[in-house]
Image: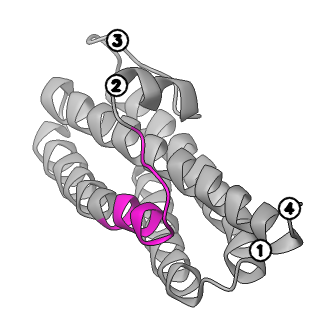
Amino acid sequence: MAHAGDNSKTALIDGLNGLLADHLALYFKTKNFHWHVTGPRFRDLHLLFDEQAIEIRDQIDAIGERVRKNGAMTLTSIGSVAQHTQIADQDDTTLKAEAMIEELRDDNQKLVERLKALKKHAEAAGDNATDGLLDDWTDMAEERVWFLSSTLS
């Protein structure tokens, strides 16, 4: 018979794997835009996108390790990432800089929402370590949204 704690743990693991998928997909999209941005703000946006990609990349391992520390398995492939992410692919390499900024802003906002929703699952599962990390990751994602929003005209 499953206990309420088991359901909380399952919801937390599912949420963490979704968060892992989002970070992997958003990392790749942010690098894609870093490589393909053009226009008069090329240098500033090229550097901003790279800074944000590095920050996102640096969270990936910590998220995967939280899944493992909770006794579960992480995503294992590009296919599993595609199944669990809410970040849509963007293959248009001719996208204008403004559209890139807007898309990354919106994707990072989705990440903020997923992070905030995960808080209740971490609390219910009694996972204080994940709970604290979620606060830090939320702050970072909110900062990315702020920076991207502030670059829009």
For marks 1 and 3, the one nearer the N-term is 3
Gap between marks 4 and 3 measured at Cα: 43 Å
- Identify the amino acid type marked 2: Ile
For marks 2 and 1, the one nearer the N-term is 2
Who's the residue at 52% across and 49% down the image?
A: 17
- Identify the amino acid type marked 4: Ala
Who's the residue at 39% across and 40% down the image?
A: 26
**Could you tell me residue 149's position as x and y percent?**
50, 54
- Identify the amino acid type marked 1: Lys
Q: Residues within 10 Å of mark 3 (few under 14, many from 20)?
A: few
**Front label number (4 vs 2):** 4
The residue under label 1 is 120
**Could you tell me residue 24's position as x and y percent?**
35, 41
Q: Are marks 4 and 2 in contact (CB under 8 Å)?
A: no
The residue under label 2 is 78
Who's the residue at 33% across and 68% down the image?
A: 62
Q: Are marks 1 and 4 in contact (CB under 8 Å)?
A: no
Check the image and report above or below for 135 versus 121. Answer: below
The residue under label 4 is 2
Q: Residues within 10 Å of mark 2 (few under 14, many from 20)?
A: few
